[in-house]
Amino acid sequence: SPPPLPPGIKPPPLPPPPLPPTSPPPPMIQVLDIDYSENIDYSDDPVVLDTASPVITLSGEAAVVITQTHQSSYADAGATAVDAVDGFVDVTVTGLDAIMLSVASETPYLVTYTAKDLFDNEADPVTRSVTIIRACPDPSYLCNITDVDTCATCAESGSCLCLSSA
């Protein structure tokens, strides 16, 4: 133990207490800006939010009337779709496969056109009606012919006749 101090003398100050053990610094988090896609644009261009739907426009008439024929397929005039942000977008067509040009029908076939833009905004569908009318008056019917120059188009009295080439 240290010797007593003379009167009027103060003891020297005590050393500061030891500092508590320091904890290790928190781990550093490094944020990496990795672009995994070449399609992402990190430019300062403003972001355009597309909420408008494309608009479909028919090429040709909305109602088509065709005389019955043995042609293999109907040649549709088509349609286009334009979006305010994306420009021209793809048009999906349904109903073309059902059209049979060789069969007259009182009920029109319906060809439907749909489209959507890159933001999945869907256009209002547009429809074209295709009516196939009889080529021959009742009770005759359309002949299945290959040579229209020498064969009758319509069956008269129940038979399709061709002229001989002799």
Image: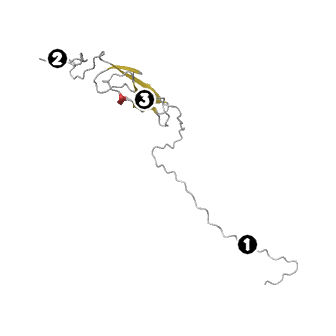
Q: Calculate the distance from the C-alpha at mark 2 to the C-alpha at mark 3.
A: 45 Å
Residue 163 image label: 2
Q: Mark 1 or 2, which is nearer the eye?
A: 2
N-terminal label among 1 and 3:
1
Kindly report the distance in space between the C-alpha atoms of the residues bearing marks 1 and 2. Answer: 126 Å
Name which quarter of the figure residue 143 lies in.
top left
Q: Quadrant of the N terminus?
A: bottom right
Is disc 2 surrounded by few (<14), some (14 to 19) or many (20+) residues within 10 Å? few
Applied colour scheme: secondary structure
Please state the horizontal and vertical placement of residue 112, each as a whole percent of the image: 42, 28
Q: Tell which residue pokes out farthest to the left in this image.
A: 166
Tell me which amino acid carries mark 1. Pro
Q: Can you say whether 110 is above or below 153 in the image?
A: below
Against 45, is 19 above or below? below
Q: Give above or below for 80 relative to 164.
A: below
Three-letter amino acid code at disc 2? Leu
Q: Is residue 55 left or right of residue 12?
A: left
**Is residue 91 found left or right of 163 in the rendered image?**
right
Residue 40 image offset from top left, x and y in percent: 48, 44
Instruction: Point out the frontmost of discs 2 and 3.
Output: 2
Q: Which residue is mark 3?
A: 113
Q: CA distance from mark 1 to mark 3?
A: 85 Å
Q: Which residue is mark 1?
A: 17
User: What is the three-letter code of the residue carrying label 3?
Assistant: Tyr
Whichever of labels 2 and 3 marks the residue nearer the N terminus, that label is: 3
Check if mark 1's residue and mark 3's residue have beta carbons within 8 Å: no
Residue 74 image point, x, y percent: 33, 25
Tell us which disc is closer to us: 1 or 3. Answer: 3
Mark earlier in primary sequence (1, 2): 1
